[in-house]
Image (spheres, rainbow, N blue to C red):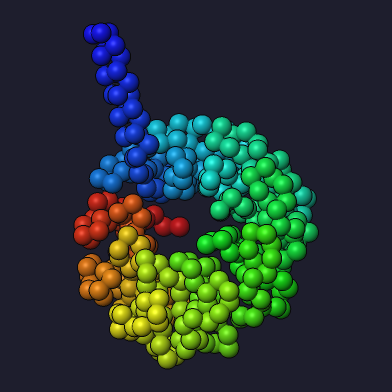
Amino acid sequence: MQRRNIQACYIILQLLLFSHLTAQVLFPINYTDESELKKTAYIDKSGKIVIEPQYGIGSRFSEGLAKVKDIDKYCYINQNGARVIPKLFDDARDFSEGLAAVRVGKNWRTGWKWGYIDKEGKYKIKLQFHEAGKFSEGLARIENDYKWGFIDKKGKIAIEPQFWYAHDFSDGMALIKQKSEGSFGFINKNGKVIVKPDFDWAEDFSEGVAAVCRGKKYGYIDKNGKVIIKLDFAKAHSFSEGLAAVREKDWHTGKDGYIDKKGKIVIEPQFDYAGPFCQGLARINIGGRDNIGLITGGKWGYIDKSGKIIIEPQFDWVDDFSDDVAQVKIGDTLCYIDKTGKIIYQKKEENK
């Protein structure tokens, strides 16, 4: 009996240790070493360096692995910093739904090819595509001969390559464009056109609706293509956490605010840029200028869903919150902050 109790305690301890390791969230920090090579270290939420800068430029961890560039090839590391998939690839994407798109070949003219590997580095879908995206809702977009289609996780063609442009599936729908001079529409997972190409611009479906544009006027449609919020805005973005950022009046001189799913203004237009809500906070800019999507000048901060400023506009650049942490810049100093605005890590960027 005592031996069984000891074994049970050991198993519980192992499970607790495993859950701690898998729950660890790490964030990339870029360095330049003495030989001018760019390398990436990783910090935890306290700002402590967990993985020393030993590989080239790396991405954030996705599904427990991060892609890093080791001299001239890409490989994948785990959260202990150990290389678990060898450096075999000329390009690579993050893991999504258990698979990652990887490329072999450096020049598209001489026939580079994309395929998909699992977390052991084994090819699950052989190298065969000219371009390849991540898996989303069980399907991944691929391109051959300048036509985009979709495959399933076995590599079988699920939707024949036929589109001039296609984006990832979101909310069961994928944004497509049938020809370069054509309009945007949406298909379902059977490849059927559900929303006919009738828009000059559109964003992915999110929370059951999609932002669309026709003739420089923006609004929202449902999954049947029905306009549910009139195309009356100068700019509109996807819904996130129940709210969407919109701009009234003119694209260049108007202000951004937020609407609800009924199209009602719930946060008055007052910002020079407003981003999506992520973990209850949205990044906003005051004093900047929108140059067709590129915001220059001004200062960035964060608001909550009531429109209250939670973190004062003080940064020169910010990103959305993820895992309760956001990346920001003050001048040429890169920082990570928590949701109170407290800096948990900062590092001056080297000259590029």
Image quadrant for the N terminus? top left
**Percent x, y of residue 317:** 36, 66
- Quarter assignment of residue 308: bottom left
**Closest to the observer, 72 or 253:** 253
Task: Give coordinates of residue 318: x percent, y percent.
Answer: 35, 64
Above/below status of 165 relative to 342: below
The mark tally for this picture is 0
Quarter occupied by residue 109: bottom right
The answer to whether one can see residue 194 in this image is yes
**Image height of 318 relative to 43, above or below:** below
Camera-nearest residue between 198 and 182: 198
Quarter occupied by the C terminus = bottom left
Tell me: 33 left or right of 123.
left
> Horizontal and vertical percent for residue 167?
60, 63
Determine the residue positioned at 49% across, 72% down. 209
Q: Residue at x 69, y 65 (%)?
A: 192
Q: Quadrant of residue 53?
A: top left
State the residue at coordinates (55%, 79%).
226
Q: Is residue 292 above or below residue 101?
A: below
